[in-house]
Image (spheres, rainbow, N blue to C red):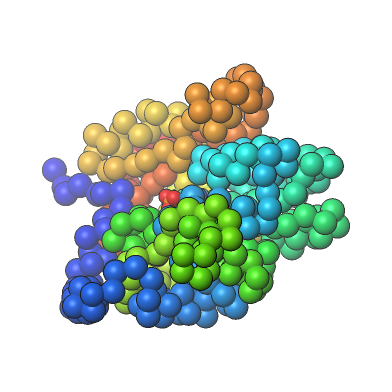
Amino acid sequence: MSTDVPFLALAPIYEELREEIDAVALRVLHSGWFIGGPEAERFEAAFAAYTGAAHAVGVGNGLDALHLTLRAMEIGPGDEVIVASNSFIATMLAVSMTGATPVMVEPDSATYNLDPARVEEAITPRTKVVLPTHLYGQPADLDALLAIARRHGLKLVEDAAQAHGARYRGVRVGAHGDAVCWSFYPSKNLGAAGDGGGVTTNDPALAARIRTLGNYGSAERYVNIEKGVNSRLDPLHAAIMGVKLPHLDAWNARRASIASLYLDTLRDCDLVLPHVPNWAEPVWHLFVVHTPRRDALRATLAADGIATQIHYPIPAHRQAAYAELGFGEGSFPIAERLAAETLSLPIGPHMTMDQAERVVGAVRAASTA
Ligand SMILES: *Cc1c(COP(=O)(O)O)cnc(C)c1O
């Protein structure tokens, strides 16, 4: 029995950078400065520079990044925000938190990302924002979505929680739309040692408003200009991510070499593999295959000691949380079929090529018979 292949190993990220991470963690502990301050500012500046945006604002998590961005854009009850029907539910929840309605639109069935043609059809006089998710680490078709947003006077907000370092037509995701929202949840391509999030934008007023909203609606101490929340990026997380950020491209490159191996060696299997348009440079947050025999394949791999996951088993419109929208089975057939057939294979910056070859062997044995 060979050793197991985990879905994603997080401990080796720390092991690789242990000395530096320990040093900055101690630096923060000794500084006595535990909220905001120079460590948070330094990471914000570094992340803004990395993404090519003029401003980065740290917040408490990715859901807040989306929610506070929408609030800063004055989105609220009566407004509609267009989202992909197959996105992670946080994309929809952020819209709901403002009182606006998430309008789900089916994805392109090859890229799993928001389909510009369907977005255009879904626009109503109430639509205020188009909110694509760069799902699984692959950018959505930003030029097409931006053109639609500009034509209709809408904002474009990107959910980049899975896309740290991804490029669209050679340019890193980070400032194509009006705002780009990030999660630093530990398993994302760039992760904190707990919850964290951020927003990048070229709009200084928007950045300032998001920062104010995340600080009780206060830009000046004890002066509250609106009803904000408490959502900030802690300096401990900021300092740790400051150590990790210079390694992100190398880690993404390792993910890409595993993805290439999968793409090359699983081509003749009875599986739908990811499709990468020529303008996209994904960062392979997940490597997702589709098959109607998903549950059987998953069980076979599990018996071989290979961990897989499902992103996501129940589309948002079929969750009890969204029963109020009244969408029955068949309302979004593409999202429903994807949910029934999707399977995420192990991938990560510290997965070895031997482990990847083991996954290939097991998938091939189960899918080419
Ligand atoms: C992780 C994720 C979020 C939410 O981020 P949190 O930091 O967990 O709140 C939002 N959207 C997508 C697509 C995600 O993958």
Expressed as whole percent of the image width and height from the top left, the position of residue 295 reads 39, 28
Identified at 55% across, 45% down, the residue is 94
The residue closer to the viewer here, 111 or 177, is: 177
Number of numbered discs overlaid on the protein picture: 0
- Please indicate, yes or no, whether residue 237 appears anywhere in the rendered image: yes
The residue closer to the viewer here, 282 or 194, is: 194
Image: 119 above or below 240: above
Image: 228 above or below 243: above
Corner quadrant of residue 308: top left
Expressed as whole percent of the image width and height from the top left, the position of residue 356 reads 32, 55
Corner quadrant of residue 252: bottom left
Expressed as whole percent of the image width and height from the top left, the position of residue 119 reads 75, 45
The residue closer to the viewer here, 333 or 241, is: 241
- Please indicate, yes or no, whether residue 141 appears anywhere in the rendered image: no
Corner quadrant of residue 17: bottom left
Residue at the outermost left position: 1
Name the image quarter holding the N terminus: top left
Identified at 59% across, 34% down, the residue is 335
Expressed as whole percent of the image width and height from the top left, the position of residue 33 reads 28, 74
Image: 155 above or below 98: below
Q: Is residue 249 left or right of residue 149?
A: left
Identified at 43% across, 77% down, the residue is 41
